[in-house]
Amino acid sequence: SVGGIAALLYGITRGGEHGWAEGITLGSFAIAAVLLPLFLRIQARGSDPLLPLGLFKNRDRFGSYSSILLLAFGPMGVFYLLTLHMQHVLAYSPIQTGLAWLPFGFGIILGAGLTTKLGDRLSPRALAVTGMLISSVSIYSLSLIGLNTSYALHIMPAIFGVAFGFGMGVVSLTLTAVRGVQAQEAGIASALLNASQQIGVAFGLAILSTIAISTTNFRMFNALQRLYESRESGDSVLLTSATDALVTGYGTALGAAALAIAFAALLAGMLIREKPSVKA
């Protein structure tokens, strides 16, 4: 499973940089296509499997695992892409960039806390879908930022919204993933939720960075280097073109992240049927 996922992620990352028909890229995909089905076959036939596939038969649990994979896909990729945008396009220093992300921490705390309080009144599905839609809309807002976008009026509220929705989604999906599991499978059910989240992070970074690089290179090859060259030489035309290429790449990738989380909300809405833990 580790080898198959690693090969798949490497193939995605390499394909964006060296081409999808390149030999190593195709070889990585081929390895993943062999190892991942082999892992599932072994787990299905084993008498004491590491991953009991029966866990996926529960509709709520399957919806939670699928949704959290896509939910983690988005915000963690946003961290990477927006940090690049801040430092390269907006010319933030590392300290300024770190401080700019402080609202994310507050959003996580408030989103998770609110979801915990509302868990006995509203269903996990309603909370999860609401949180993911908030996060999706906020990421889409970030995909529209440019060179002159206001931090206080646009970037900061969007960062807070991404985190707030993420906190709501994670807490809600955790409840549905582990509720009703037999005692002997509680550990693997929780571990599988964490694994799904971490795999989502890895896929998010690989896929979104590939989208950003491919889109940027389509507009201007090696745009980042040319951006810094234009700043040193004072070439305003090159500066505008390089900046536009980078902004388009980051924006396209962020738009893809917003779409992924919107799809996660759709999955949660269709699959999860868990009711509130206590009726109001």
Image (cartoon, helix red, strand yellow):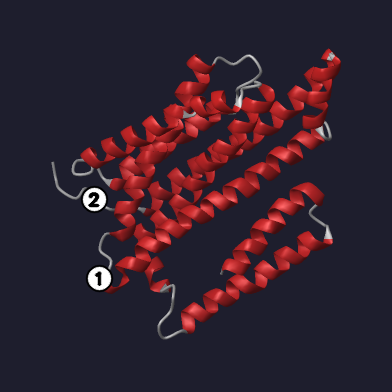
Q: Which residue is mark 1?
A: 183
Q: Residue at x 66, y 17 (%)?
A: 147
Query: As drawn, which residue projects farthest toward the front?
Result: 95
> Residue 54: image x %, image y %?
38, 73
> Residue 32: image x %, image y %?
66, 67
Q: Residue at x 59, y 77 (%)?
A: 38
Q: Amino acid at mark 1?
A: Ala
The first of marks 2 and 1 along the sequence is 1
Report the mark closest to the observer, 2 or 1: 1
182 in relation to 201, above or below: below
- Helix, strand or loop status at disc 1: helix
Q: Residue at x 49, y 54 (%)?
A: 198
> Residue 176: image x %, image y %?
31, 55
Q: Which residue is mark 2?
A: 275
User: Where's the N terminus, which quadrant?
Assistant: bottom right
**Residue 227 falls left or right of residue 77:** right
Q: Residue at x 69, y 38 (%)?
A: 212
Of 270 and 56, the residue lying toward us: 56
Q: Which mark is residue 78?
A: none
What distance separates the C-alpha of mark 2 from that of mark 1?
21 Å
Query: As drawn, which residue projects farthest toward the bottom?
Result: 47
> Residue 36: image x %, image y %?
59, 70
**Residue 274 falls left or right of residue 155:** left
**Residue 160 falls left or right of residue 141:** left
User: Where's the C terminus, which quadrant?
Assistant: top left
